[in-house]
Image (cartoon, grey):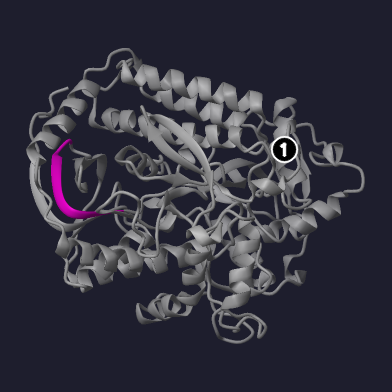
């Protein structure tokens, strides 16, 4: 490899924001408007790549509890919905902030001219009921969160935020005084040493832990791993969203309203997937009725048996060669859906799938189980500050505003509310922090680590990613057991040792990126499986087949610290001491 790995271009800024989804863009804008110099680094192209902008869903929700969708809705009802879904694993302070500042965040979207889907009956924004919610409050946005990302990119550019695109953060610079910058590598191999007074991490998610994911290929747990290695306390990493998506000809989420029409769901032999695995007293109609209330898997209601049945069918060899099944919607009439907004959203989804060469009126959809979002992350306070001085987190990189299950329409809201708070807190902290001491020594250490990785020999790095995806898909997606989680931990530890020993070749810039990504996925995977093994019960998105009941004493969170390079677990209530 003929790359210059012994030197880096140096740039200085007050606030470095890592990740340019809705949370990162909102944080960058808030910090810049508060007077800070801001540099926003993104792994891909801003407004195009990442979880906010990627086109794996026809629409997204943005929750505003103002009564527009139901006169009985208000912030208190929204708060109760979140806390009910969280099942003891959310921080009540952060939930209160989220619901109280939702209307202001919605006003920001109007100010930035973000378009909503129009209700054909009223001419106003279409409002529907989101996952796990008791009232319709989600204003629907076409193309998931892309319109928000595009609008915020425009606002950031106007405000003078500096951008670095197509750059992966390899390591955070930290000292005894906290976070002080990062080392980046661009896609052409240029190294950039960012010296910052404050760092905001917003690159969340780790969907690439699994064979199939409804997150794009660049979502490899980078933010979690960066914060974890820097010393940030983590929590709720055993809770994640999973569900069904199309496998081919393109990836796409299977929305809740697809189940509301009682579709046929069959295996490779044409046999029903679900019926053989339903327990006494639960019918297919019961399962899909509950499933129509939420997209992601949850053990909290009878819909659990749909994903569990699919997982068991895969293990029994009944899935297709791609570990998929067939969802047949040819016989249904989506215009007859009665849930608020569903009939119009059905039409939106149908046209969206047609754009991806999937015609639900002519052939079944080829679907599979997908890893999606993570409900855990760095523990933050009201200002999005982590437990590491100078390091803040927002969006899916943080936890607290949700827990065991997460309401639909809350993540984009969370990104704007806590992205804004992170930006304001970062600008304030930057005025008080000096930073920069010992920068040359930290850069030298980071470059030495990079050169060591570049000297790896042996198998292609894709083999590490394949091993990680296989063990996590087999042992941590939907059905979990003590034995399976232990097997996953052993595989991940073996990959940790191989990566540390340089057992994978890194011949190109992309290979080097993939080495760092594999290390990130191993760290995040270990946090997930060790926490899932410790939680010997079933709660929300965490299902233990060997402990299928909820246990009252587990109405709290597993907190993870890094000790000797590995996860160290404890059990705590998130939030102030009096909340315990």
**Is residue 195 covered in magenta?**
yes
Which picture quadrant has residue 315?
Answer: top right
Across and down, in percent, residue 36 comes to: 17, 66
Using the image, determine if residue 474 lies above or below residue 368.
above
At which x and y percent is residue 359?
Answer: 64, 53
- Helix, strand or loop at disc 1? helix
Q: Which residues, given as a range, are shown in magenta? A: 189-200
Tell which of 435 and 311 is nearer to you.
Answer: 435
Residue placed at 48% from the left, 75% from the top?
102
Residue 469 as seen in the image, left or right of residue 347: left
Rendering coords of residue 306 (x, y %):
75, 45
Residue at the top extreme?
Answer: 458
Q: In the displayed orientation, state which residue is furthest to the right.
A: 281
| Dominant secondary-structure state across the stretch colored magenta | strand
Q: Is residue 59 magenta?
A: no
Of 455 and 248, nearer the camera is 455
Q: Residues within 10 Å of mark 1 (few under 14, many from 20)?
A: many
Q: Is residue 38 visible?
A: yes
The answer to whether 570 appears left or right of 172 in the picture is right
Residue at horizontal 33%, vertical 31%?
514
Where does label 1 land, which residue?
Answer: 310
């Amino acid at each position: 490899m003929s790359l210059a790995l012994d030197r880096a271009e140096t740039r200085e800024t007050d606030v470095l924001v890592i990740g340019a989804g809705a949370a990162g863009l909102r944080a960058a804008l808030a910090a810049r408007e508060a007077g800070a110099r801001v540099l926003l680094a993104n792994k891909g192209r801003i407004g195009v790549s990442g979880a906010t902008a990627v086109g794996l869903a026809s629409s997204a929700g943005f929750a505003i509890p103002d009564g527009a969708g139901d006169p009985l809705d208000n912030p208190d009802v929204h708060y109760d919905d979140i806390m009910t879904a969280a099942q003891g694993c959310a921080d009540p302070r952060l939930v209160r902030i989220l619901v109280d500042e939702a209307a202001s965040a919605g006003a920001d979207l109007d100010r930035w001219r973000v378009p909503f889907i129009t209700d054909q009956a009223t001419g106003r924004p279409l409002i529907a009921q989101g996952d796990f919610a008791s009232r319709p409050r989600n204003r629907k946005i076409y193309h998931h969160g892309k319109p928000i990302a595009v609008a915020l990119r425009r606002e950031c550019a106007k405000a003078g935020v500096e951008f670095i695109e197509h750059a992966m953060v390899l390591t955070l610079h930290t000292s005894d005084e906290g976070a002080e910058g990062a080392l980046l590598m661009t896609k052409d191999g240029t190294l950039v040493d960012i010296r910052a007074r404050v760092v905001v991490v917003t690159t969340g998610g780790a969907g690439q832990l699994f064979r199939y994911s409804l997150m794009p290929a660049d979502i490899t747990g980078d933010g979690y791993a960066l914060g974890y290695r820097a010393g940030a306390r983590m929590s709720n990493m055993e809770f994640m969203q999973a569900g069904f998506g199309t496998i081919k000809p393109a990836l796409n989420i299977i929305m809740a309203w697809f189940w509301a029409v009682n579709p046929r769901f069959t295996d490779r032999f044409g046999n029903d997937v679900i019926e053989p695995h339903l327990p006494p007293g639960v019918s297919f109609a019961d399962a899909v009725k509950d499933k129509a209330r939420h997209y992601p898997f949850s053990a909290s209601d009878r819909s659990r048996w749909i994903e569990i049945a699919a997982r068991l069918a895969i293990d029994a060899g009944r899935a297709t060669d791609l570990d998929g099944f067939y969802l047949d919607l040819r016989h249904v009439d989506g215009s007859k859906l009665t849930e608020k907004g569903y009939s119009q959203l059905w039409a939106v989804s149908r046209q969206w799938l047609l754009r991806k060469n999937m015609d639900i009126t002519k052939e079944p959809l080829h679907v599979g189980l997908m890893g999606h979002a993570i409900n855990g992350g760095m523990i933050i306070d009201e200002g999005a500050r982590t437990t590491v001085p100078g390091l803040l987190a927002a969006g899916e990189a943080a936890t607290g505003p949700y827990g065991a299950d997460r309401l639909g329409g809350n993540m984009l809201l969370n990104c704007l509310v806590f992205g804004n708070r992170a930006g304001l807190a970062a600008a304030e902290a930057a005025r008080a922090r000096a930073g920069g001491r010992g920068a040359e020594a930290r850069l030298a250490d980071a470059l030495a680590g990079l050169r060591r990785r570049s000297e790896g020999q042996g198998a292609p790095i894709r083999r590490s990613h394949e091993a990680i995806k296989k063990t996590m898909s087999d042992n941590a997606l939907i059905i979990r057991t003590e034995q399976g989680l232990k097997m996953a931990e052993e595989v991940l530890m073996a990959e940790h040792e191989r990566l540390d020993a340089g057992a994978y070749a890194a011949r190109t810039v992309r290979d080097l990126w993939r080495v760092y990504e594999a290390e990130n996925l191993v760290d995040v995977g270990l946090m997930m499986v060790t926490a899932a093994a410790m939680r010997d019960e079933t709660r929300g998105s965490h299902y233990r087949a060997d402990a299928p009941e909820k246990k009252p004493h587990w109405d709290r969170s597993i907190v993870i610290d890094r000790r000797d390079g590995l996860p160290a677990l404890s059990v705590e209530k998130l939030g102030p001491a009096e909340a315990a």
